[in-house]
Structures are given as C-alpha cells and as structure tokens.
Image (cartoon, helix red, strand yellow):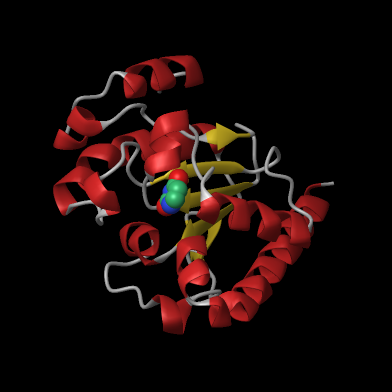
Amino acid sequence: MLSWDELRTECLACRKCGLCEGRTNVVFGCGNPDADVLFIGEGPGRDEDLQGIPFVGRAGRLLDDMLLAVGFDREDVYIANIVKCRPPQNRDPLPEEREACLAWLRNQVALIRPKIIVCLGRIAAGVILHEDYRISQEHGQWIDRAGVRMTAVYHPAALLRNPNLKGAAMADFIKIKQEADALASKEK
Ligand code: URA
C-alpha cells in the first residue's frame, strides 16, 4: 500500500482521464488522516479547483456551518471527493472519470480506515453505496459494510438550491455525530 506522501504525489500528477486537461489543481482531500469520519463529495467546483482544497466555495461554507452546528471540527474529519479534478461547467463526472479516479479514494479509505463514511449527495452515494441510490428516500439510513457504517446526506449545494431540505439534512448530521460519539466511546 502507498504511504500518504506517495499517494498524494502520484495523485497530484494523475493523467488517467480527460479531466486533467482543464484543471488548475488536483483536489486531493483535506483533514485528519486518522479521522473516524470520512465525508465524500462529488468533485471540485471552481473555487476548489483554484485553491486545491475540497468544499471551500458556497457549498463548502454551508458544510462547515453544519459540521460546526453538530460539534464536528473540519480538522477532525477527512473530506474528499469521488473525482479529484473539476468537471467542466460542474457537470456530473462521467462513469469513466469516476472509475479512473476511484483508485485514489480507495487508497485514501485504506489509509484512513474510517469508522463512518458519509456520502455528500446522490453522485457519491451512487458510487459508494449502491448504483440506484435515491437520496430523497434513503438519506440518513445506515448501511454496514466491512465493519464501516455508511450513509448519505443531501449535498450542501442541493440545500442551497432548496433550503426546505435543510431540516432533514441537519437531522441526519445530528444522527451521524451521535453515532461517531457512540463509536468513539466504545473504543475507550
Ligand atoms: N462540491 C463537491 O462535491 N465537492 C467539492 O469539493 C465542492 C463542491
């Protein structure tokens, strides 16, 4: 298995799909490499591409607010994306782009060994949880796989478009924090 440094170095030089042509930066991921909780978004937008850091635009600020509101610190969790380079005009990443990029995320998961994986939005949920994931019906439900608790919540960008969904998303975040606290206290 690659070390963090090797993984990052190789990922930053990746040319496995066409998204490398338009990128300013590879958005590798950020946070605590020993995190109990891993959040996985879809892919970088304009701000993330410019800064090389996930979730730093408007949706990212909302994510930060929600994390803080339930007692998570952005520095304590890890945040990554399904694809590490920005799709043009923020379109959904194509199946071949997702497939090409997934090895990086698999390596990240193997190094972090999170107890909880939270998919941010339907694209991440469709890749990580199951192909026909219906976010409006299944958000907040737990799936246990290989000793990891997995779930999905509405993408923060969806909450910006439809603020009516914020209540449901906050309820999911509260549940996730409670679960993270319960798993952490079991360890002691
Ligand atoms: N949306 C995502 O899915 N990921 C980011 O990093 C930013 C916005």
Q: Is residue 62 left or right of residue 154?
A: right
Tell me what residue is drawn at x 49 percent, y 21 percent. Answer: 4
**In this figure, what is the number of numbered marks?**
0
Q: Is residue 146 left or right of residue 89?
A: right
In this rendering, does residue 74 appear at all?
yes
**Vertical placement of residue 120 versus 61, above or below:** below
In the rendered view of the protein, which quadrant contains the N terminus?
top left
**Vertical placement of residue 148 versus 97, above or below:** below
Q: Position of residue 67 (x, y in %)?
A: 69, 55
Which one is nearer the viewer's eye here, 56 or 172?
A: 56
Tell me what residue is drawn at x 32 percent, y 58 percent. Answer: 127
Q: Quadrant of residue 113?
A: top right
Q: Position of residue 78 (x, y in %)?
A: 58, 41
Q: Position of residue 103 (x, y in %)?
A: 30, 36
Tell me what residue is drawn at x 41 percent, y 45 percent. Answer: 81
Which one is nearer the viewer's eye here, 188 or 161?
A: 161
Q: Is residue 185 left or right of residue 123?
A: right
Q: Is residue 159 left or right of residue 2?
A: right
Q: Quadrant of residue 172?
A: bottom right
In this rendering, does residue 27 appear at all?
no
Q: Position of residue 155 (x, y in %)?
A: 47, 64
Tell me what residue is drawn at x 34 percent, y 24 percent. Answer: 11
Q: Quadrant of residue 131?
A: bottom left
**Vertical placement of residue 69 versus 142, above or below:** above
